[in-house]
Image (tube, rainbow, N blue to C red):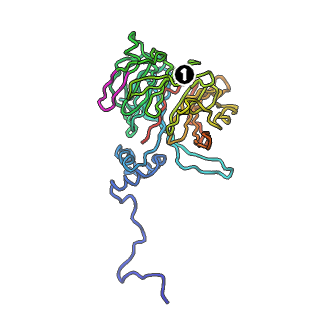
């Protein structure tokens, strides 16, 4: 009879314990950790001081970039009561979805505050732009003293440094990133509108230069209600408070502006973002729309009136304010601050976040499905606003 078991050689003994992952060299262990979702990093950092050191090093994010395991991470900044520095937070969402017996999706998340340090910004900022693994925070927020300052947050190490100051001090300007440059528009208090209207930062040279309006007359002002987005190599801009505002498109290669549409009251845009070369917006009618660049028309996204959120008795969009829309790994992220009504002395506010999947169907229709909805934070009523929101890939 042939046995399935093999006896070890005489005098030899097989060690039943397999080698531990902690016995691997740092370089190999870092490569292994870089392949794990960032959502697990807070717990993994508790395993040992060595894990904490590797996960805290900027080198692991270089490795993540090289092997293609970078993930979207959401950052936002809260405006705290006077004489307090603004507080930054980062949100890591669990990539896997767990279905309950009722078919509901449970998504976990980790919300981490960024600790203040001696090189943190002394004042809050309004405009934020993601450039690689860094966030550029620019100028001053609404009803603050105008500022030309630029600060840069390295999201790998969560450290701040000074960036090159703008040529013009600005308050509640708006900014976008395109092809190695940051474009900043509006929010100035200068007399020479033709020069102050827009300026551009070349990331490579870290130098600012002015950009003329070249025909975008409605936008060439000190307006603090402008918004911009990038689609297919062009910058789209509008005044989101004007009922019949014009939607402009700027072509950097030709240095020309053109009017692509005049908006009606029903398409008054509060926030917008671009996902897979399609522009999505949230409107005054509490609906989500997408821009058909071929017909140059806004079309309703089906199933997108956020009906579930609007019908809630508390913490719904009708009692809050949409802050912005974001592209989060190809999903639509909606963020807003809502009021919780009750005893006046105990009134609080909550920061809500909802993630929705997009589906393109036959006939040119776009549908969304809500798959994640959470209250991220409960704050005192004295917290007035979310100053900045941005999604960074690290």
Residue 219 coordinates in the image, percent (x, y): 47, 18
Q: Residue at x 46, y 31 (%)?
A: 230
Q: How many marks?
A: 1
Residue 127 magenta-highlighted: no
Examine the residues drawn in magenta and state their main secondary structure: strand
Q: Which one is in front, 11 or 18?
A: 18
Q: Quadrant of residue 343?
A: top right
User: Residue 346: in sight, yes or no?
Assistant: no
| Residue located at (41% from left, 23% from top) | 256
Residue at image position (57%, 27%) is 380
- Residue 23 is situated, as x and y percent measured from the top left of the image, at 36, 60
Pointer 1 residue = 240
Identify the secondary structure beneath mark 1.
Answer: loop
Image check: 303 left or right of 208? right
Observer-nearest of 201 and 261: 261
> Front-most of 159 and 391?
391
Query: Which region of the structure is painted magenta?
Result: 199-209
Residue 383 drawn at (x, y percent): 54, 25
User: Is the residue marked by circle 1 packed among few (<14), some (14-19), or many (20+) residues within 10 Å?
Assistant: many
Can you give x and y, in whole percent of width and height, for residue 10 in the image?
A: 36, 83
Residue occupying the point 52% across, 47% down: 95
Position of 48 relative to 82 (above/below) = below
**Furthest-bottom residue in this view:** 1
Residue 354: image quadrant is top right
Q: Is residue 276 above or below residue 259?
A: below
Q: Is residue 158 left or right of residue 205?
A: right
Image quadrant in which the C terminus is located: top left
Extreme-front residue of the structure: 295
Asked if one can make out residue 311 in the rendered structure from this viewpoint, the answer is yes
* Res 364 quadrant in image: top right
């Amino acid at each position: 009879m042939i046995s399935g078991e093999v006896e070890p050689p005489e005098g030899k003994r097989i060690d039943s314990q397999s080698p531990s992952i902690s016995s691997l060299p740092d370089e190999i262990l870092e490569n292994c950790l870089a392949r794990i979702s960032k959502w697990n990093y807070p717990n993994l950092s508790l395993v040992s001081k060595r894990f904490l050191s590797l996960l805290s090093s900027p080198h692991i994010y270089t490795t993540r970039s090289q092997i293609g395991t970078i993930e979207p991470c959401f950052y936002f900044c809260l405006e705290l009561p006077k004489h307090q520095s603004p507080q930054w937070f980062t949100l890591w969402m669990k990539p896997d979805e767990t279905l309950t017996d009722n078919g509901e999706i449970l998504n976990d998340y980790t919300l981490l505050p960024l600790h203040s340090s001696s090189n943190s910004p002394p004042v809050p900022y309004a405009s934020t732009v993601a450039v690689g693994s860094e966030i550029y925070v620019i100028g001053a927020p609404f009803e603050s003293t105008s500022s030309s300052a630029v600060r840069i947050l390295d999201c790998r190490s969560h450290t701040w440094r000074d960036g090159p100051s703008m040529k013009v001090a600005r308050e509640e300007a708006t900014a976008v990133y395109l092809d190695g440059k940051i474009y900043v528009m509006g929010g100035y208090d200068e007399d020479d509108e033709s020069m102050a209207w827009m300026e551009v930062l070349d990331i490579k040279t870290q130098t600012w230069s002015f950009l003329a309006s070249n025909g975008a007359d409605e936008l060439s002002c000190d307006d603090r209600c402008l918004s911009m987005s990038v689609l297919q190599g062009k910058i789209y801009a509008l005044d989101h408070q004007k009922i019949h505002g014009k939607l402009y498109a700027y072509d950097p290669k030709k240095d020309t502006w053109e009017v692509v549409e005049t908006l009606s009251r029903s398409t008054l845009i509060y926030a917008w973002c671009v996902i897979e070369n399609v522009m999505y917006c949230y409107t005054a009618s509490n609906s989500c729309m997408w821009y058909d660049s071929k017909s140059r028309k806004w079309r309703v996204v089906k199933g997108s009136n956020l009906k579930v959120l609007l019908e809630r008795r508390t913490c719904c969009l009708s009692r809050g304010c949409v802050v912005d829309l974001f592209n989060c790994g190809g999903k639509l992220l909606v963020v807003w601050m809502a009021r919780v009504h009750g005893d006046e002395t105990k009134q609080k506010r909550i920061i809500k976040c909802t993630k929705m999947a997009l589906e393109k169907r036959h006939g040119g229709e776009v549908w969304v499905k809500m798959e994640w909805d959470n209250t991220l934070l409960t704050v005192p009523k004295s917290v007035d606003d979310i100053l900045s929101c941005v999604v960074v890939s690290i």
